[in-house]
Amino acid sequence: MFRRRAAYTITELLLTLAAAGILAGIAGPVLHDQVAAARGRSATNQLVAAIHLARSMAIRRAREVVICPAPDCAADARWNDGWLVFVNEDADRPPRRDDEETVLRRQSAMPGVSITANRGYFVIRRVGLRSTNGTLTVCDSRGAAHARAVIVSYTGRPRIARSRPDGDPLQC
């Protein structure tokens, strides 16, 4: 005698595949938005951490610390390609990293994130001396509505804003 084996019918398999397809169609855009948001937050947090590091090292070493676009702070370098934090021992203007100058942090490009700044570099100085102030705008694939600005004060302290000072949205 043959035993009947438990199995799925073709109809059950097609219904299961159809349900999985519908769920994937719904979850795909949500997942994309979550990944984009995480990338934007990560880039913002990395910039803030780099500024805090630069400020603390400028105070500790009593030297200028520079944050500039990677790989070498060149005038045509872009913030999208990452950034560099180094001790500017010779205080050259515009700052250029020489071989003997210590690199404190090197951040590579972050995929899916666009970073623009109103400064080509930021010089952070010890307490009592004025640092370069300015704004770095971080955008992800969701657009300007979700952009963040990292604002560096004259004292070298960063803060995060979601809009321009006049309340207008940030531009990507």
Image (cartoon, rainbow, N blue to C red):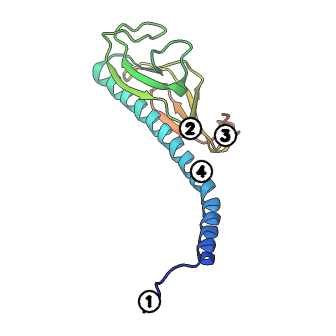
User: Earlier along the polypeptide chain: callout 2 or callout 4?
Assistant: 4
* Real-space CA distance between mark 2 and mark 4, rounded to the nearest whole angstrom: 11 Å
Q: Amino acid at mark 2?
A: Gly
Instruction: Give the number of the mark in front: 2 or 3.
Output: 2
Q: Residue at x 55, y 21 (%)?
A: 78
Q: Amino acid at mark 3?
A: Ala
* Residue behind mark 1: 2
Q: Amino acid at mark 4?
A: Asp
User: Earlier along the polypeptide chain: callout 2 or callout 1?
Assistant: 1
User: Earlier along the polypeptide chain: callout 4 or callout 1?
Assistant: 1
Residue in the foreground of this view, choosing between 48 and 3: 3
Q: Secondary structure at mark 4?
A: helix
* Real-space CA distance between mark 2 and mark 3, rounded to the nearest whole angstrom: 14 Å
Instruction: Give the number of the mark in front: 2 or 1.
Output: 1
On residue 33, the disc is: 4
Residue in the foreground of this view, choosing between 44 and 135: 44
Toward which corner of the image does residue 30 lie, by quadrant?
bottom right
Q: Contact, CB < 8 Å: mark 2 with mark 3?
A: no
Q: Residue at x 56, y 38 (%)?
A: 112
Instruction: Give the number of the mark in front: 4 or 1.
Output: 1
Q: Residues within 10 Å of mark 4 (few under 14, many from 20)?
A: some
On residue 112, the disc is: 2
